[in-house]
């Protein structure tokens, strides 16, 4: 059931969370499937609904830094990042405090938890009214495309009977940047709207850790449509649909009817990120022989777009 966000709906959602139920809510990145982080049964429900392997930990969401500090250690360097980028599309992997009541299932038994303060009024109102952290993966079946609208969340979870709070289209459109601070060196486990350059102003970023092993969710095949995909396409083949970026005319064959959605005609990478998942989903529903994607500049948030496209295109 999709309900427009308002005070009453937030109260209803909080009652559901108190009971150990899950709710879908908007954030600035993607819609999340949220549950009480301190309730093992609620956390188990999230894994079950998404059909997600339980070795893949969840991100805990908070409404302010002080609240997060009740549960995790925030070292000085991380605190500076937190002050600059929270609320916002950044997740830091931080150490649990002794006696931390967040379910161990949520962090897949790890000493370290993904922590984020989302920059969306509905998410913040929900977190504040609930008063406890909410664990929330993206509101889609495991390995599939993340939803960036309430309607997409409904179909991404196979129309299961869940409360979905509609807070409009997600402005960022790509999941948060994940920074691992769990072993002395800072590494980026998942690129996002907060770029390596942004973070490098505050701390040195190491390239050492293998993203495959450190972030269990960073599996190669992820964000996947059902159709096959062809990346960096400069000439469209028959029967393909096009996901364009910038001027798509040159890629267009002179004859035949083709379908094209353009991530950003003006070549704006932020706009492209915000449109990426919804357009991929729309093209996928046409069952094309392949979704052909034009080259995306690998700079700024373009790094995150290319990361998602490469995973979406991976056959493994
Ligand atoms: O933007 C976002 O981060 C969205 C919204 C809803 O906040 N959430 C999201 O969650 O993308 P999810 O579960 O789809 O992706 C979380 C990623 C996974 O790749 C997971 O492996 C990694 O974060 N992760 C979570 N906790 C971790 C931990 N303790 N150590 C290493 N990686 C972790
Ligand atoms: Mg996800």
Image (cartoon, grey):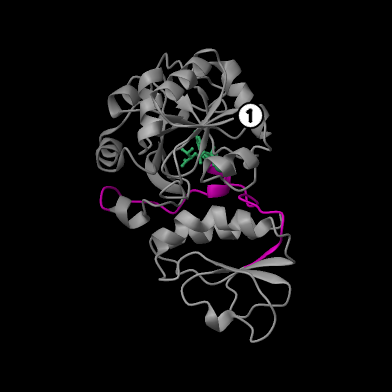
Magenta stretch holds residue 216: yes
- Residue position marked by numbered label 1 in the rendering: 47
Where's the N terminus, which quadrant? top right
Check if residue 213 falls in the magenta segment. Answer: yes
Number of marks in the rendered image: 1
Residue plotted at (25% across, 34% down)? 76
Residue 163 drawn at (x, y percent): 56, 27
Please provide percent x and percent y for residue 148: 51, 46
* Residue 167 occupies quadrant: top left
Give the image location of residue 196, x and y in percent.
Answer: 36, 55
| Residue lying at 54% horizontally and 39% vertically, measured from the top left | 138
Q: Which residues are magenta?
A: 201-230
Considering the image in quadrants, where does the C terminus appear?
bottom right
- Mark 1, residues whose alpha carbon is within 10 Å: few (<14), some, or many (≥20)? many
Tell me if I can see residue 304 in this picture.
no
Q: In the rendered view, would you say 314 is above or below 121?
A: below
Residue at 32 percent of width and 57 percent of height: 197
Image side of residue 50 versus residue 61, left or right? right
Tell me if residue 232 comes above or below residue 14 in the rendering: below
Q: Is residue 43 left or right of residue 302?
A: right
Name the side, left or right, on which 293 lies relative to 71: right
- Look at the numbered disc 1 and give the secondary structure of its residue: helix
């Amino acid at each position: 059931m999709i309900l427009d966000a308002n005070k009453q709906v937030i109260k209803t959602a909080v009652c559901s969370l108190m009971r150990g139920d899950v709710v879908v809510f908007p954030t600035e990145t993607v819609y999340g499937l949220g549950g009480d982080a301190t309730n093992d049964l609620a956390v188990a429900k999230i894994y079950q609904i998404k059909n997600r392997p339980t070795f893949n930990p969840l991100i805990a969401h908070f409404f302010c830094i002080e609240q997060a500090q009740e549960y995790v250690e925030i070292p000085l360097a991380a605190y500076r990042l937190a002050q600059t980028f929270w609320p916002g599309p950044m997740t830091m992997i931080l150490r649990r405090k002794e006696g931390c009541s967040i379910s161990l299932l949520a962090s897949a038994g790890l000493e370290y938890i993904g922590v984020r303060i989302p920059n969306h009024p509905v998410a913040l109102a929900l977190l504040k009214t609930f008063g406890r952290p909410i664990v929330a993966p993206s509101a889609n079946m495991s390995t599939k495309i993340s939803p960036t609208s309430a309607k997409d969340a409904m179909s991404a979870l196979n129309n299961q009977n869940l409360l979905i709070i509609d807070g409009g289209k997600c402005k960022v459109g790509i999941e948060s940047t994940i920074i691992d601070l769990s072993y002395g060196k800072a590494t980026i486990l998942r690129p996002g709207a907060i770029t390596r350059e942004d973070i490098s102003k505050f701390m040195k970023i190491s390239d050492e850790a293998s993203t495959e092993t450190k972030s269990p969710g960073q599996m190669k095949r992820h964000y996947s449509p059902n159709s096959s995909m062809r990346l960096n396409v400069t000439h469209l083949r028959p029967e393909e649909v096009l996901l364009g970026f910038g001027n798509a005319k040159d890629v267009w064959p002179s004859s035949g009817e083709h379908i094209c959605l353009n991530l950003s005609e003006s070549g704006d990478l932020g706009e492209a990120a915000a449109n990426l998942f919804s357009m991929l989903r729309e093209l996928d529903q046409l069952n094309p022989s392949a979704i052909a994607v034009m080259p995306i500049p690998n700079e700024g948030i373009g790094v995150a777009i290319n990361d998602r496209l490469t995973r979406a295109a991976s056959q493994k």
